[in-house]
Amino acid sequence: MKAFSVVTEPIDPQLYADYVLRPEAGAVTLFTGHVREWTQGIKTLYLAYEAYVPMAEKKLAQIGQEIEERWEGTRVAIAHRIGELQISDIAVVIAVSSPHRKAAYEANEYAIERIKEIVPIWKKEIWNDGEEWIGDQKKKPEGETI
């Protein structure tokens, strides 16, 4: 298993949690981002993700390095799936272990925000009556929080 990967098959989060787990870790946080059915009252049928895989994996590794430098003692694994994803499928998994829980939580949130900022992965939403490439992943629909 690669610690930082773009995959086309369904993601098994346990593989990533197991990868970061080690004796000195007192906490492991595991974030899974899923395809949701409704966004701002519009029903999504499925999503399609595309990526420039070599660059995307390089950027995922960069995020892992940033985290390990910023939160001492952390270990990180990240995978993002591309292709057609159905409702409730896992699009991204982020696993972080650290000696203490606060660092693991903070580092995990940092990772998803950095993915949206710098990783060249593009998302298309497909609805009953159309489709649209979604641009800036940092923008959140009104009323939505992290």
Image: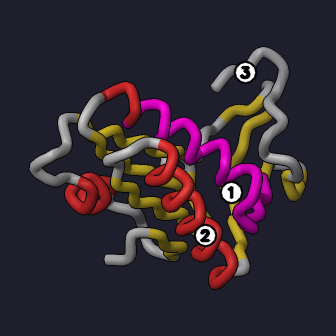
Q: In terms of secondary structure, what is the magenta stretch mainly?
A: helix
Quadrant location of residue 59?
bottom right
| Farthest-out residue, top | 143
Query: Which residue is labeled 3 in the image?
Result: 144
Question: Counting other residues with Cα less than 10 Å from the Cα at mark 2, is it few (<14), some (14-19), or many (20 or more)?
Answer: many
Residue 131 shows in this picture? no
Q: Residues within 10 Å of mark 3 (few under 14, many from 20)?
A: few
**What amino acid is labelled 2 in the image?**
Ile
**What's the mark number on residue 47?**
1
Front one among 86 and 62 = 62
Is 47 left, or right, of 112 in this rendering? Answer: right
The residue under label 2 is 82
- How many numbered callouts? 3
Toward the viewer: 83 or 115? 115
Q: CA distance from mark 1 to mark 3?
A: 19 Å
Mark 3 lies on a secondary structure that is: loop
Q: Which quadrant is the C terminus positioned in? A: top right
Look at the numbered discs 2 and 3 and tell me whether their residues touch, using CB distance below 8 Å: no
Q: Earlier in the sequence, mark 1 or mark 3?
A: 1
Q: Nearer the viewer, mark 1 or mark 3?
A: 3
Q: Secondary structure at mark 2?
A: loop
Residue at screen point 47% across, 69% down: 4
Coloured how? secondary structure
Q: How far across and how far down the image is residue 85, in percent? A: 58, 60
Name the element at disc 1. strand
Does label 2 or label 1 sit earlier along the sequence?
Answer: 1
Closer mark to the observer between disc 2 and disc 1: 2
Question: What's drawn in magenta, residue-wise?
Answer: 104-125
